[in-house]
Image (cartoon, rainbow, N blue to C red):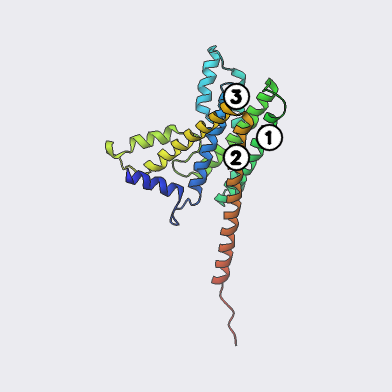
């Protein structure tokens, strides 16, 4: 248990020797965003996931079978938007992934714009009509596809921000109880907890307030992550420039 707690602590506050620093806590926050956004899409947009494509593909099969309350078109819209977003995230990675924190900040910035657009759609008019529903599915699906592609390109172990099946499998299969190394158990549990917390918070906001409030929270988190990312990248570049200046040989004086 102590090792698990220490591992979770190192994920939230990475040491200076962590090669992925400062990405782990930012990706934990993005996992919370996933739970928040999927709570909105499932509870308000008609039983469809915009981030969890495994569940969405399963729902698509159910819808084709005629299960009540599910829409083939909505599931296809979410899937198509997610794929388009993932392609966009892949393109951003090809252009900006050399500086990882800046790449994350850029991806999250684009994601923030899409979430903000969905928020505007939700805030205009009373109720969620068909046109507005599909507009929100497309915007949120694009946003979450970008997030997933960015997290995949960053490749921080056990912090995919959306897919938990492999994370939970690793937690169970690698435990010392079954002869495994027990490594990263805290990080894996933290990832699952982050998504559950996001889903709980999103569902609570949807059920007790409205969809607008439920979208404001992930938007605030995303803007905060982007601001931190740009600031960290700027500071890191300045430190490297100062170090390069200090290491530069000085001209000899006569």
Q: Are marks 3 and 2 in contact (CB under 8 Å)?
A: no
**Which is nearer the N-term, disc 3 or disc 1?**
3
Question: Distance of mark 3 from mark 2, alpha carbons?
Answer: 26 Å
Q: Which residue is mark 3?
A: 44
The residue that appears at 53% across and 43% down in the rendered structure is 153
Quadrant location, the N terminus: top left
Residue 235 placed where, x, y %? 58, 59
Crowd band around label 1 with a 10 angstrom C-alpha radius: few (<14), some (14–19), many (20+) = some
| Residue that sits furthest to the front in the current view | 208
Helix, strand or loop status at disc 3: helix
Furthest residue toward bottom: 254
- The residue mark sitting in front, 1 or 2, is 1
Q: Position of residue 179 (x, y in %)?
A: 27, 38
Residue at the image point whose x is 37% and y is 41% from the top: 185
Question: Which residue is depicted at the point 59% across and 46% down?
Answer: 224
| Depth check, front residue: 35 or 157 | 35
* Disc 3/disc 1 C-alpha distance (Å): 16 Å
Q: Residue furthest right?
A: 125
Q: Which residue is mark 2?
A: 89
């Amino acid at each position: 248990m102590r090792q698990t707690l220490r591992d979770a602590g190192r994920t939230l506050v990475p040491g200076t020797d962590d090669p992925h620093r400062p990405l782990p806590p930012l990706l934990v926050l993005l996992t919370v965003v996933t739970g928040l956004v999927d709570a909105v899409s499932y509870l308000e947009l008609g039983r469809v996931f915009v981030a969890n494509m495994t569940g969405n593909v399963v729902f698509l099969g159910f819808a084709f079978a005629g299960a009540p309350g599910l829409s083939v078109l909505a599931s296809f819209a979410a899937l198509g938007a997610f794929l388009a977003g993932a392609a966009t995230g892949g393109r951003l990675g090809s252009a900006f992934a050399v500086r990882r924190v800046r790449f994350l900040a850029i991806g999250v910035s684009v994601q923030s714009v899409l979430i903000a657009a969905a928020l505007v759609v939700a805030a205009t008019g009373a109720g969620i009509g068909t046109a507005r529903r599909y507009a929100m599915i497309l915007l949120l699906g694009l946003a979450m596809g970008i997030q997933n592609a960015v997290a995949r390109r960053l490749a921080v172990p056990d912090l995919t921000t959306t897919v938990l099946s492999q994370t939970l499998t690793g937690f169970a299969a690698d435990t010392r109880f079954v002869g495994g190394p027990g490594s990263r158990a805290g990080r894996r549990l933290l990832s699952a907890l982050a998504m559950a917390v996001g889903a709980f918070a999103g569902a609570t906001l949807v059920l007790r307030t409205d969809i607008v409030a439920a979208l404001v929270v992930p938007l605030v988190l995303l803007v905060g992550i982007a601001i931190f990312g740009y600031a960290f990248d700027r500071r890191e570049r300045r430190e490297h420039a100062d170090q390069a200046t200090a290491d530069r040989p000085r001209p000899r004086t006569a």
